[in-house]
Image (cartoon, rainbow, N blue to C red):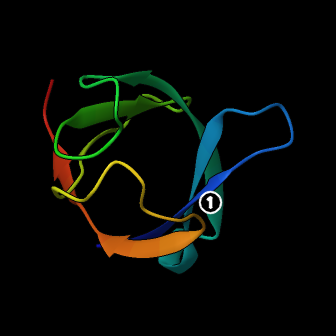
Amino acid sequence: MKVMIRKNATGGHSIYVPKKDLEEPIVTMEKPGLWGGKISLGNGWILELPEMAADTKLPITVEVRKSEA
């Protein structure tokens, strides 16, 4: 599914899912650089992010996969 990742006002990251009209904060990241690992959202979803360069500019739209715990 396609999502938009951006930095929020508090300096953290949030994800917007257009098809669900859902915006949630990223609460945990498997890897410190955000990309290439699993993340968990405020609503409990776990998503797998693609590998990308650590200095990728935000906001960006990427394809992610929903994952089980």
Residue 50's image quarter?
Answer: bottom left
What type is the residue that disc 1 sits on?
Leu
Q: Residue at x 18, y 37 (%)?
A: 37
Residue behind mark 1: 22
Q: Is residue 23 left or right of residue 5?
A: right
Residue most extreme to the front: 55
Occupied quadrant, residue 55? bottom left
User: Which residue: 22% across, 34% down?
Assistant: 38
Q: Is residue 21 above or below residue 9?
A: below
Are there few (<14), some (14-19), or many (20+) residues within 10 Å of tag 1?
few
Residue 21, horizontal then vertical, whole percent? 64, 70
Left or right of 64 on screen, residue 11? right
Quarter of the view holding residue 16: bottom right
Where residue 19 appears, as percent x and y from the top left, is: 50, 79
Residue shown at the point (76%, 45%) measured from the top left: 8
> What is the quadrant of the C terminus in the image?
top left
Q: Is residue 36 above or below residue 46?
A: below
As drawn, is 61 to the left or to the right of 2? right
